[in-house]
Amino acid sequence: WSLLVLKDGEFLHCDSANGTNYAAALQLAKAVAPHLGWLNPSEVEIQSAKTPQQQNCYDCGVYTLAFADAIASRSINGSVDVVEAMSLITPKGISSLRERLVKLIQTIAQRNS
């Protein structure tokens, strides 16, 4: 999984594949930059964040949701410590989130059937 974060005017890339997704993240940042009005696409740089690695091959989406939630919920006041947000994500927490998501999906499916 890969997550691109805009923090304090800089792009930060969280990548569970140790940089494998860097080129795609840079391409996305360059595409978004003109819409922000403060960056020339040729000047766009992204910083790679030390990102915890998942322990299996099926929790990619759950990790991405957990990191996005951790970062977004801590950025309400305008500043976020991404390293702190990442430190809150644990394999046990991911397992719990996966279980909650399954229950939520089942509940929604039952309502719509």
Image (cartoon, helix red, strand yellow):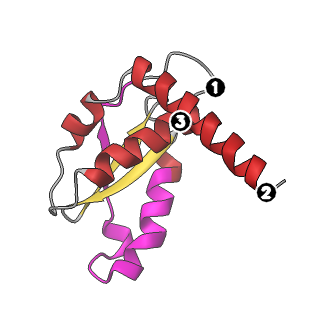
Range drawn in magenta: 25-52
* Along the viewing direction, whichever of 85 and 11 lies nearer the viewer: 85
Quick one: SS at disc 3? Answer: helix
Q: Residue 87, image x and y in percent?
A: 25, 28
Q: Which residue is mark 2?
A: 112
Q: Earlier in the sequence, mark 1 or mark 2?
A: 1
- Asked which secondary structure carries label 2, the reply is loop
Looking at marks 3 and 2 on the same chain, the residue that comes earlier in the sequence is marked by 3
- Residue 34 inside the magenta-drawn segment: yes
Badge 1 local density, few (<14 within 10 Å), some, or many (20+)?
Answer: few
Q: At which x and y percent is residue 27?
A: 50, 60
Residue 104 image position (x, y, % from top left): 61, 43
Of badges 1 and 2, nearer the viewer stands 2
The disc labelled 1 sits on which kind of residue? Answer: Tyr
Of circles 3 and 2, which is in front? 2
Q: Which residue is identified by label 3?
A: 62
> Dot 3 surroundings within 10 Å: few (below 14), some, or many (20 or more)?
some
Determine the residue positioned at 57% across, 28% down: 99
Q: Which amino acid type is shown beneath numbered disc 3?
A: Val
Residue farthest to the right, as pictured: 113
Q: Are marks 3 and 2 in contact (CB under 8 Å)?
A: no
Q: CA distance from mark 3 to mark 2?
A: 23 Å
Amino acid type indicated by mark 2: Asn
Quarter of the image for residue 7 reads bottom left
Residue under label 1, please give it: 58
Is the residue under label 2 in contact with that under label 1 (CB below 8 Å)? no
Q: Position of residue 113 (x, y in %)?
A: 84, 53
Quarter assignment of residue 26 = bottom left
